[in-house]
Image (cartoon, helix red, strand yellow):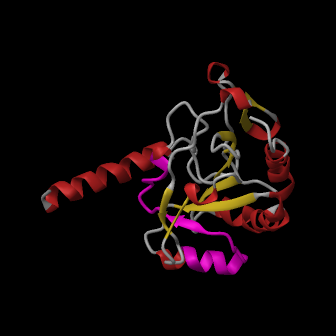
């Protein structure tokens, strides 16, 4: 593949990711709309959920860890409930929810819950690393500046469409819930608890 072709493909991926996230952009007020045909239910606060029988498999999300420690991805946490948070250091709502995410991550760590960030549209990882240090974030994040991992979510699923977006993946690796706005710790727990309670259920 020539250098020109490679650059064009990279540009296409970047523009595609931007289009995916252009509906509400970096906004603390973005809300989701339910799609009954897809089996989604939109509850209070714009949180979309899918009953166990209507859930789609989460894509194979993986990439280089933001801390440079190597590859990290959903496959590393099989059998756990995974909370995916799509964020950027430049995003004000992301800053607003960061401490609450860390609090809930620590609270549920011994209940088989793993948090995993997807950092996007940060052209310099140093900014994202500083963000994590400032807010005391201890769970890993994938560095995904072009949105390549975000584009893996199938359309019509509980896919991210704004930043921040938080998605709960159940123990069977399926997309269970989504919020396309900044979350308080209480809101996040309300979204997470029902999925954690499903332990042993199919």
Front one among 46 and 84: 84
Residue that sits furthest to the left in the current view: 2
Question: Which of the 4 image quadrants contains residue 115?
Answer: bottom right
Name the residue at 85% across, 65% down. 107
x and y percentages locating residue 70 in the rendered image: 48, 73
Question: Which of the 4 image quadrants contains residue 10?
Answer: bottom left
Name the residue at 80% across, 52% down. 188
**Residue 42 drawn in magenta:** no
Q: Horizontal placement of 78 versus 146: left or right?
A: right
Front one among 163 and 86: 86
**Residue 132 drawn in magenta:** yes
Q: Horizontal placement of 190 versus 154: left or right?
A: right
x and y percentages locating residue 153 in the rendered image: 51, 42
Q: Horizontal placement of 178 versus 187: left or right?
A: left
Name the residue at 74% across, 28% down. 41
User: Which quadrant does the N terminus fall into?
Assistant: bottom left
Front one among 175 and 32: 175
The residue range painted magenta reads 128-151
User: Which quadrant does the C terminus fall into?
Assistant: top right
Above or below: residue 150 compared with residue 198: below
């Amino acid at each position: 593949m020539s250098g020109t072709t490679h650059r064009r493909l990279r540009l296409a991926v970047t523009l595609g990711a931007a289009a995916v996230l252009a509906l509400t952009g970096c906004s603390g007020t973005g809300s989701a709309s339910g799609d009954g045909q897809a089996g989604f239910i939109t509850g209070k606060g714009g949180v979309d959920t899918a009953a166990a029988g209507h859930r789609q498999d989460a894509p194979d999300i993986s990439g280089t860890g933001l801390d440079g420690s190597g590859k990290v991805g959903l496959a590393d946490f099989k059998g756990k409930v995974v909370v995916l948070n799509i964020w950027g250091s430049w995003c004000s709502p992301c800053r607003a929810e960061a401490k609450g995410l860390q609090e809930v991550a620590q609270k549920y760590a011994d209940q088989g819950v793993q948090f995993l960030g997807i950092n996007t549209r940060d052209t310099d990882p140093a900014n994202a690393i500083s963000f994590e240090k400032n807010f005391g974030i201890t769970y890993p994040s994938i560095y995904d500046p072009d949105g390549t991992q975000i584009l893996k979510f199938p359309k019509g699923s509980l896919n991210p469409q704004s930043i921040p977006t938080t998605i709960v993946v159940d123990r069977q690796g399926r997309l269970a819930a989504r919020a396309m706005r900044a979350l308080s710790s209480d809101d996040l727990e309300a979204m997470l608890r029902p999925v954690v309670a499903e332990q042993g259920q199919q």
